[in-house]
Amino acid sequence: MAGPARELAGLVIDVHTKIAGAEGVEQSVVEAVDRRRLAVIELFKADLGIEKR
């Protein structure tokens, strides 16, 4: 769980840094990071034994 969460944090920081620096990022990159975020949430829920709705 910790590994995927750290990796996601790094990706989010990278994307936010690019946006803040006026570099910008493509919408597809933002969507890909969001999908990773949702996947980490599902891993976290599974780790806690929380069922999907």
Image: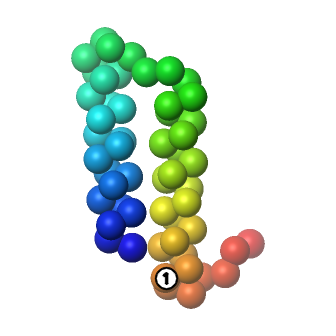
Picture quadrant of residue 28: top right
- Crowdedness near tag 1: few (<14), some (14–19) or many (≥20) residues, C-alpha within 10 Å: few
Instruction: Point out the residue furthest to the right here.
Output: 53
Is the residue 21 above or below the residue 47 in the image? Answer: above
Q: Residue at x 32, y 14 (%)?
A: 23
Badge 1 amino acid: Asp
Picture quadrant of residue 17: top left
Picture quadrant of residue 13: top left
Q: Is residue 37 left or right of residue 7?
A: right
Q: Residue at x 50, y 84 (%)?
A: 48
Identify the image's colour scheme: rainbow, by chain, secondary structure or one colour.
rainbow
Q: Nearer the viewer, residue 48 or 39?
A: 39
Q: Position of residue 49 (x, y in %)?
A: 56, 87
Q: Position of residue 3 (x, y in %)?
A: 33, 67
SS at badge 1? helix
Instruction: Point out the residue furthest to the top here.
Output: 22
Q: Residue at x 66, y 81 (%)?
A: 51
Is the residue 20 above or below the residue 9 in the image? Answer: above
Q: Position of residue 47 (x, y in %)?
A: 49, 82
Question: In which quadrant will I find the C terminus?
Answer: bottom right
| Residue annotated with mark 1 | 47
Is the residue 45 above or below the residue 31 in the image? Answer: below
Q: Residue at x 51, y 51 (%)?
A: 36
Is the residue 19 above or below the residue 9 in the image? Answer: above
Q: Position of residue 1 (x, y in %)?
A: 39, 73
